Amino acid sequence: MDRAPSVESLRAIDGTLHVDGPLVSECSEDFGHIVRRRPSAVVRPASAEDIVRTIRFARAHGVEVAVRGQGHSTYGQPLVAGGLVIHMRGMDAIEAVRAGAADVQAGARWNQLLEATLQDGWTPPVLTDYLELTVGGTLSVGGVGGTSHARGFQVDNVTELEVVTGVGEIRTCSAHQDPELFDAALGGLGQVAVIVRATVDLVPAPTHVRSYRLRYHDLPGFTSDQVALISEGRVDHVQGRIELSSDGRWEYVLDAAIFHSTPGEPRDAPLQGAVHHDGEPEETEEVSYRQFANRLADSVALQQELGTWHLPHPWFDMLLPGRHVNACVAGVLAQLDPTDLGGGTILLSPLHRGRLTRPLPRVPDDEIVFQFDILGTAPPDPATISQVIARNRTFFEQMRQLGGVRYPIGVIPFRPHDWRSHLGSAWSAMERAKARYDPECTLNPGHGVFRTDTTLPD
Ligand SMILES: Cc1cc2nc3c(=O)[nH]c(=O)nc-3n(C[C@H](O)[C@H](O)[C@H](O)COP(=O)(O)OP(=O)(O)OC[C@H]3O[C@@H](n4cnc5c(N)ncnc54)[C@H](O)[C@@H]3O)c2cc1C
């Protein structure tokens, strides 16, 4: 096929076509800076019809298509070599905000949606820690945040999607209308459709947030207090971190927060249920809900200034069954050289399995599930990066033996047979949906779900 001249026909779209320049360079990499794949062109659609035209063009010419939100994946998930990238940044309208729900285009970032909804006193019930991610990008993987213990993933808080399927048809789907498509699109890694618009639940926004910090020296005490706090409903927001203390030991930090709308209240002791911590809870300052939601902004600005933001990020992300969380995490911490983190962080936070209602993303089979992330950086040295990737795969195998399941945003080499076993009982539904909505495997090859990704190590 003579790609260069024929792709020019896409200039007739309402959006823009880019065959070289900064956008093509940007779309050749993601936040991980580990995988590099140059597309032949980037389309910035202005409408669902533009996406239809792009996908139909790609099918007609046997070209693959990757969809890109903010490109904050870490292992080439939004990349495609020689194919087309659909860059959703321009499709970011907040179309409607009403009581209890918002209609938003998939290229909008969560902070755009939050700003729009706060004006009317609403908020999405689950926000990711970092708000510069697109609605379509997080709905493709799940979307977990500090309120997920109570509200599930972001995909649990969506009632309707407009999508363009891999055969280039615009469809509206929900739990009642075309549920097969809805189930495969939410948390479905973009394998069957491009999400164009989502109807996202909203809840009344608190005005203020009071945060508490508890420190622990033992892992079981830390995890058992986390479970107690979410089970007794004492706190609204929970996030656990694992840090290296000044004496070189692992230290466990629990950040818990109460949402409220009466400055100065509540004054009671919401952390009474926490019994294993060392010393008194540290009460951190009370801030507005907007400030709290944007709490990572300063640290991101600093990382950008220092340059660490642009280093490779070989992240490791899992969901762990509560009954084996201590064994899983202790095993990995014993093998982890803290200097490997490169100034990054480790997260460990609890969720109620019962709040996770969607077939995707996959989660461990236990009442309590923990989100576990090793969010490190690495020097831009291929040998070191290969070692960390091999280490990630080893950690994955160890955790899988104990019932751990991958949260699919990080850097773990996966081939189609890994995805098949990862999807488990959801595999046949995904395979059926793929055959129906993207039979030629046009969409999102970067995860390697249906075709082996040739850039992966053997
Ligand atoms: C600093 C940082 C903080 C993070 N914090 C969190 C967090 O708190 N919670 C959490 O759950 N995750 C978190 N993540 C991970 C993040 O949610 C995922 O990597 C997410 O997929 C990135 O969103 P994005 O808009 O950059 O998507 P991209 O990286 O551009 O795309 C991600 C995947 O989704 C597909 N995709 C994107 N848009 C669409 C669409 N409209 N339709 C169909 N498929 C699409 C892409 O093809 C790709 O496969 C964080 C990542 C970073 C870098």
Image: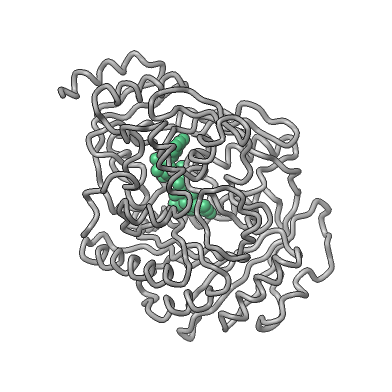
**Residue 369 percent location from the top left of the image:** 57, 64
Q: Based on the displayed image, in which of its 4 quarters is residue 316 positioned?
A: bottom left
**Residue 380 percent location from the top left of the image:** 26, 59
Closest to the observer, 328 or 3: 328
**Residue 250 percent location from the top left of the image:** 49, 80
Residue at left offset 72%, top offset 30%: 98
Measured along the vertical axis of the image, is residue 281 above or below residue 128? below
**Residue 408 percent location from the top left of the image:** 43, 53
Residue at left offset 72%, top offset 56%: 209
Judge whether residue 297 can be spotted in this image: no
Give the farthest residue toward the left: 2
Measured along the vertical axis of the image, is residue 311 above or below residue 158? below
Q: Is residue 122 left or right of residue 239?
A: right
Closest to the observer, 229 or 266: 229
Q: In which quarter of the image is the C terminus?
A: bottom left
Measured along the vertical axis of the image, is residue 377 above or below residue 280? above
Measured along the vertical axis of the image, is residue 456 above or below residue 81? below
Q: Quadrant of the N terminus?
A: top left
Q: In this view, does 8 lie to the left or right of 261?
A: left
Residue at left offset 54%, top offset 69%: 241
